Image: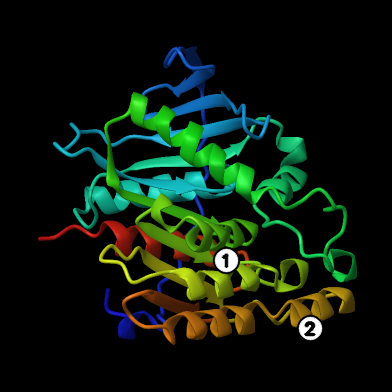
Amino acid sequence: MDLNHLIRIKTPKISHFLLIMLFIIQPISSLSAKTTEIENSHIKQVMLQSKITHQSYALSIYTPNQPAPKKGFPILYLLDGHLTFPLAQKIADNLINENQIKPIIIVGIDYTEQSQWINLRAQDYTPPHNTTITNDPFIKGEANGGGAPLFLSFINKELKPFIEQNFHVNPKQQAIFGHSYGGLFTLYTRFTQPDSFQYYYAASPSIWWDNKVIMQTVDQFMRNTSPSSSIPKFIISVGSLEQTAPDNSPNERKQKLIKRKQVNNATVLANQLNSATPDKLLTAFIIFPDQNHGTVIPLAIEQALMHFFKKSH
């Protein structure tokens, strides 16, 4: 990956897409799961009960409209699936049809209890707590966070085997994409179990969470990781406007954005990682001009698809 041309890339805006889904329930495997298949499409929805986290997950699964290659399809796992999956599926469809990326499988991970989405993601996507959590003014109602180790165990020990049992997947071409808290979880995975995926994309990661406890994981990773011949591709991105709010925004929101230091934190982390020997880390850092915390999502998804799964011509 050429790092130089990834810094401060300007990317055309992508319009948001809405998919209207009609469901027909069908079985998928002997595992405790229930499948919902969209009529006349290559999208399935699966409800999967985890014995590790004791949560029920709603999976949206997109498969290409063609036979799998001999080694299986590359695969992209998305956090916050109800937000990211419709975008990724539509963008990937267009890029595959234009012969720009390889045909891939996409798995959006979400919750069956959508009304509890905010609390459940705060539990699953956040690292173990710092002892100073009570001093963090930005965490409200998240005393039960810190569930990233269990959620990562669910992905590696339950979700991946389930997907590989039911779909032809290339285990050497697996990517994860997370935004915000999802980006924080992507960092946590990269630094604690780097062999989980070959490609990592942390979009607008919430590095500020719990007094930047994730940085302890980074420090430990950089001390203990030995050079490896199989270095995962790793991209961190952020919108240039994530530390600023419109003039008409409430003062509380302005202060929150300033104190969370989304752009500064991402920049510092990327610089720290790239200061390590190239044998250990290869981190691309992207700042999307004129984009905020929400508008970066489709741009980041397109970047992930293009840089991880670009087709060789």
Q: In the rendered view, would you say 34 is above or below 172? A: above
Q: Nearer the viewer, residue 247 or 31?
A: 31
**How would you rate the neighbour count of disc 2 (Cα within 10 Å): few for under 14, some for 14-19, many for 20 or more?**
few
Mark earlier in primary sequence (2, 1)? 2
How packed is label 1: few (under 14 Cα within 10 Å), some, or many (20 or more)?
some
Q: Is residue 7 visible?
A: yes
Residue 185 spot, x, y in % from top left: 59, 57
Residue in view at x 27 percent, y 73 percent: 1
Residue 143 percent coordinates (x, y): 85, 52
- In the rendered structure, the answer to whether residue 63 lies left or right of residue 109 reads left
Q: Secondary structure at mark 1?
A: loop
Q: Is residue 14 visible?
A: no
Residue at the spot 63% in from the left edge and 42% down from the top edge: 150
**Front: mark 2 or 1:** 1
- Residue 78 location (% of width, % of height): 49, 48
Residue at the spot 77% in from the left edge and 67% down from the top edge: 210
Residue located at (48% from left, 70% from top) = 224
- In which image quadrant can residue 115 be found? top right
Amino acid type at image mark 1 = Thr
Depth order, front residue of 135/61: 135
**In the picture shown, does residue 152 fall above or below 281?**
above
| Tag 2 secondary structure | loop
Find the residue positioned furthest to the left: 313
Residue 267 at what x, y percent from top left?
Answer: 55, 83
* 133 w.r.t. 78: above or below: below
Quarter of the image for the C terminus: give it.
bottom left
Instruction: Name the residue that disc number 1 marks.
Output: 295
Which corner quadrant of the image does residue 162 belong to? top left
29 left or right, relative to 240: left
Left/right of residue 174 with respect to residue 273 in the rendered view: left
Please give the label number shown on residue 247. Answer: 2
Q: Amino acid at mark 2?
A: Asp
